Amino acid sequence: MTTLLIADDHPLFREALRGAVQRVMPGVLLFEADTVDALYTLADAQPDADLLLMDLNMPGAQGFSALVHMRSLHPQLPVVVVSAREEPTVMRRAIDHGAFGFIPKSADSDTIGRALATVLDGERWIPAAAQNLPPTCSEEREVGQRLRDLTPQQFRVLQMLGAGRLNKQIAYDFGVSEATIKAHVTAILRKLGVTNRTQAVLMAGKLAIDADGIVLPPPEED
């Protein structure tokens, strides 16, 4: 039996996508997550899942960062991005960051069915609009490679730094000591090859879809 994971924070869209998948793949086993943290838990609980359908922006991550990190944590799990962002450049960037396919949220059931069948057969599904675009710039792809080295906890800390949170606020949210968060920040800076929190956030921001969504962290001792 084919097992698919769906990760999207909009209940109505998850319901619509679930219905579309069930129409084109009768008998499919579906599991859902509405945040990046829930997706981590779900993927760990379903190690034999055949495919992940995920949105780009969910609580816990923005842009291509969650896609990059999921491909690192579960390299055997093909990921298809399902997004309302239908610009060809966004499609191209998703593919270059490890997605096996890209399905616009406006796609009909027939397109969804053909895309899923193609990816499950081991091939990539790239919309025609993105097929002839040049590859994503090497600098952005290098950032993706560095993010792959982060542990799930470090990835969460980095996302919270990007939301402008202080170490003590992150520690409170995680239920750990501030020293633990400082240790995570130190490890993040080392793995990203930067020297401070602002540089880390700016680097991770290269995986954002829109640069104006980047929030710089307040000054704080790293």
Image (cartoon, rainbow, N blue to C red):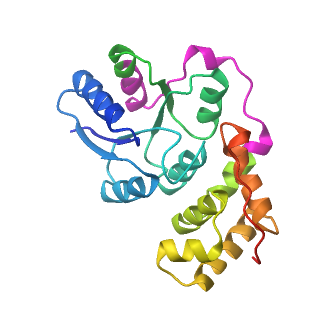
Q: Is residue 203 above or below residue 149?
A: above
Task: Answer above or below: position of 62 versus 55.
Answer: below
In this rendering, the answer to whether 173 lies above or below 72 is: below
Q: Is 26 left, or right, of 20 in this rendering?
A: left
Q: Is residue 126 magenta?
A: yes
Q: Is residue 60 magenta?
A: no
Residue in the picture at 79% in, 44% down: 139
Image coordinates for residue 134, horizontal then vertical, percent: 74, 24
Quarter holding residue 155: bottom right
- Horizontal side of 103 relative to 43 (left or right) equals right
Res 109 quadrant in image: top left
Q: Is residue 175 above or below residue 200?
A: below
Instruction: Tell me, yes or no, if residue 184 can be seen here.
Output: no
Quick one: 28 or 33, which is closer to the camera?
33
Residue 74: x %, y % from top left: 46, 53
Q: Position of residue 157 (x, y in %)?
A: 59, 66
Q: The N terminus appears in which quarter of the rendering?
A: top left
Answer yes or no: is residue 98 visible.
Answer: yes
Give x and y (percent) for residue 202: 76, 53
Q: Which residues are magenta?
A: 114-140
Q: For this view, does 5 lie left or right of residue 156?
A: left
> Which residue is depicted at the point 34% across and 55% down?
42
Q: How many dots with numbers?
A: 0
Q: Does residue 140 appear left or right of residue 167 in this picture?
A: right
Indicate the quadrant containing the C terminus: top left, top right, bottom left or bottom right. Answer: bottom right
Which residue sits furthest right? 195
Which residue is drawn at the image coordinates 82% and 69% (left, top)?
195
Residue at image point 62% right, 22% down: 87
